[in-house]
Image (cartoon, rainbow, N blue to C red):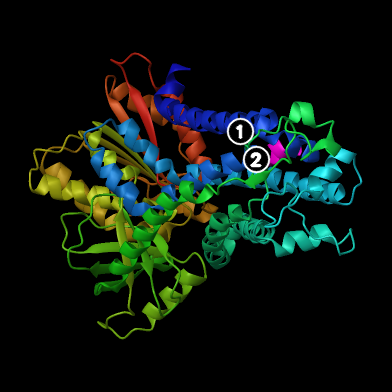
Amino acid sequence: MGNWIINNGLTAFILVVWMGINIFLFVWFYLFYDLGPQFFYTRHLLGSALAWARAPAAVLNFNCLLILLPVCRNLLSLIRGSFVCCGRTMRKQLDNNLSFHKLVAYMIALMTAVHMIAHLLNVEWYNNSRQGVYDALSTALSNLEDAGNTTYLNPIRITNLDPQQIPTYFVFTTIAGLTGVIITLALILIITSSMEVIRRSYFEVFWYTHHLFIIFFAGLVFHGAGRIVRSQTTTDPPHNFTFCKDRIEDWGRIPQCPVPQFAGGFPQTWMWVIGPMVLYLCERLLRFIRYVQTVRYRRIVMRPSKVLELQLQKNGFKMEVGQYVFLNCPAISQLEWHPFTMTSAPEEDFFSVHIRSAGDWTDKLIDIMQKLPEGAQGPKMGVDGPFGTASEDVFDYEVAMLVGAGIGVTPFASILKSIWYKFKESNPKLRTRKIYFYWLCRETHAFEWFADLLQVLESEMEERGMGDFLTYKLYLTRWDQSMADHAKVHSDEDKDVVTGLRQKTYYGRPAWDKEFEQVRKENPTSVVGTFLCGPEALAEVLLKKCAKYSDVDPRKTKFYFNKENF
């Protein structure tokens, strides 16, 4: 339990606080509408559906306030920078921004469903009351009106249509009804297109439908303007519903029972969401400013395994290790932006990305670059960033375990390059004293573009007498028997037959228990940062190992898990 708290304690606390606020808002507003005396007559028409409609609305307001904040990338980078003096555990929470964004979205979807179902029932009961289906009090309340038609209780005012058609007419002709339909349809499209299978296979569908959030928030702001939920207002003399509810015929005739008057509640949703909307608008404005800035191509290289390397330059661009940028190529799409981790080091006068063929957008970009004449500039490229990730904190740890899967090695390329520069310049600020690097690949060609960097690091460490600073292991997870036989034949050679490095390539997957046990044994009193850029399945395994091999004794080894998320 103590090991789990080391890696997940603060995250769990934040989620408990978030869920506690949701529960508090739901219960508070449920009781407010279910017990409030000003809603006595409204409850007589609607029953408990009134509270079941309004309580989710309060939770929706809170979560709609939150939903945009985790995707304000520049805001998160600013906060991450301001937390430099704070604990790494606090900064680590910012790397869970997309997970929290999804969690808030699920809550919005759930509360929208409850809110919608309750209001559909409310419309039906309003209509039945208007038609005189229920008791005399319900009919009298529904027939209340004045010269200005403003102090009524039942929002269904029309009576000259087929009673069966009135609910549909009401939904599609009132502000609350029409905006509710629009909001719900937008939310359904946003959530369904965000499913993993669609996002991975049809990213463009996900990207474009996600921008329906503009319609969602516009509808949300105007939704409450319909004021269909109405409460009793104070009259002079006051209307005592306890005394008057059974004396309908005396309403307006005796001082104790003046005709009750009602008013809709003031719209509040806009007050919840206006702040995040302004922040997000500033975010998009900053992205546009960055988009129009000139980006120059320093070098365009096609690497093995259909990996494209772009070396770019931009005035005023400054980066840290492990950061990522969003790229936009108007020649392919004016609207699509895709995230790529930078593989260059902060010490270099350019920034680079390695782009693997993984969909329509990347395939088109690679095709464009392959057709360019030698030495030509590529198409216009928009760059937004850089943005911080978990890998920024790697030099805050004495010992680091870096785990990359396939193209997921890119943030660690930046880290290892930066280490090379720091050693070259004898940087005294380098706190890290040991790095364990693991790279898992399916095919041998994937190792080629990265092997040169590892060879340089090998030589640099040996020259400085620091051969033990970097321990790296490369794993080939897919091979045939001929490859294995070839490796056996050349097993006695000094260099590996696959990579040309002194370190031999392993066939299969790492035995993580053995690796973590070795790291703990070699670093008995260290704080070890474990960094992953790879699939969720591997993340779950490493998270469990970090918890398993962390010691609750503060004087012994602790493993902190960090994962790249875009």
- The spot of residue 181 in percent (x, y) is 68, 59
Q: Secondary structure at mark 2?
A: helix
Q: Is residue 290 visible?
A: yes
Please identify the quarter of the rendering in which residue 341 is found: bottom left
Look at the picture and state if 367 lies above or below 140.
below
Q: Are marks 2 and 1 in contact (CB under 8 Å)?
A: yes
Q: Which residue is mark 2?
A: 54
- The spot of residue 384 in percent (x, y) is 32, 63
Q: Secondary structure at mark 1?
A: helix
Q: Is residue 494 visible?
A: no
Whether residue 465 is in magenta: the answer is no
Q: Given the current orientation, which residue lies at the most extreme bottom position? A: 373
Name the main secondary structure of what is drawn in magenta: helix
Residue range of the region highlighted in magenta in the rendering = 49-53
Look at the picture and state if 449 lies above or below 360.
above
Q: Amino acid at mark 2?
A: Arg
Left or right: residue 80 versus residue 20 is left
For image coordinates 75% across by 46% down, the residue present is 117
Q: Which residue is mark 1?
A: 29
Please identify the quarter of the rendering in which residue 398 is found: top left
For image coordinates 21% across by 47% down, the residue present is 458
Which of 120 and 155 lies nearest the eye of the viewer? 155
For image coordinates 17% across by 59% down, the residue present is 348
Give the Cα distance between marks 2 and 1.
Answer: 7 Å
